[in-house]
Amino acid sequence: MIPAGRTPADSARAAQLLGVSLGTFRNRRAWERLPRIVSRPGARQRIWDEEQLVAAVEGWPVPPLPDAPHPDDLLDLEEARLALPEERRPTAATWASYVSTGRGPEPDEFVFGVPHFRRRTLPAWLAARPGRGAGGGRPEGARDSRPRDRSGDPRHRRAEERRERVRELLVEGRWPRPEQLAEELSVSRRQAERLVAQARAELVDATRRPG
């Protein structure tokens, strides 16, 4: 979580402050000598608080971060999901699908390529979303008695091909820049970022399944 009003800093910024290359920073595991990251443990990007980072590098006292939650705190995809009430909290894969297809809240910011949501965005989105069985149409989670066959729909095939391409890149350990991926897949940068977020969440969910 990036506390409200704080400036985030990534590994490139940390390496710059230490006067080393990013490769050297990673090879020497220099982050172990720095303050605790503000990003979630296990997140793809290590993110620090800029003020804390500068203080640590300069040898000054490291200022504390705010303890109390703030409506403008920035939460990554998983932090945002966990901030939802448990009784209405989707799985990681479903949540990523909601966000990538526009059924979830729109990310408020992309911090170093990672979608983030302000804390206040989540209750507003949840309040506007029908509960189970509320409103018109089918209840949430209802399934067709017979699955719809979309295999003949060219748009569905193209969308699935794009998702599969992104999954392949992530499995290979490659992290394409959003603008490069957007050009390769002929989509907008925003859609490319959503495809990556969805694929990452699906892979994480798959690794956590028993067996």
Image (tube, grey):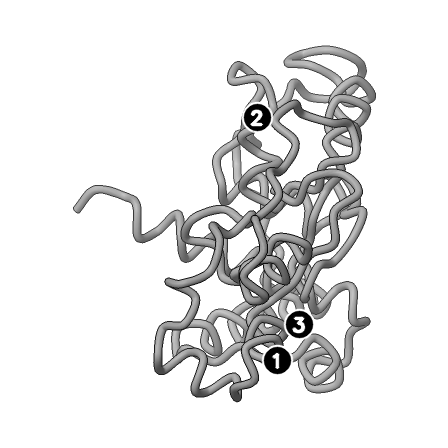
Disc 1/disc 2 C-alpha distance (Å): 48 Å
Q: Is residue 202 left or right of residue 117?
A: left
| Residue beneath disc 2 | 141
Q: Secondary structure at mark 2?
A: loop
- Mark carried by residue 6: none
- The amino acid beneath tag 3 is Arg
Q: Amino acid at mark 1?
A: Gln
Q: Earlier in the sequence, mark 2 or mark 3?
A: 2
How far across and down, in percent of the image, does residue 209 sit? 28, 44
User: Closer to the camera, 84 or 36?
Assistant: 36
Q: Is residue 179 left or right of residue 49?
A: right
Q: Of label 3 and label 1, which has the lower sequence position?
A: 1
With 91 as the anchor, is 88 left or right in this view? right
| Residue in view at x 68 percent, y 52 percent | 100
Q: Residue at x 52, y 88 (%)?
A: 21
Secondary structure of residue under mark 3: helix
Say what secondary structure mark 1 lies in: helix
Residue 90: % across, % down: 53, 30
Q: Which residue is mark 3?
A: 158
Q: Residue beneath label 1, please?
A: 16
Discs 2, 3 touching: Cβ within 8 Å: no
Q: Is residue 109 above or below residue 155?
A: above
Crowdedness near tag 1: few (<14), some (14–19) or many (≥20) residues, C-alpha within 10 Å: few
Residue 40 drawn at (x, y percent): 49, 46
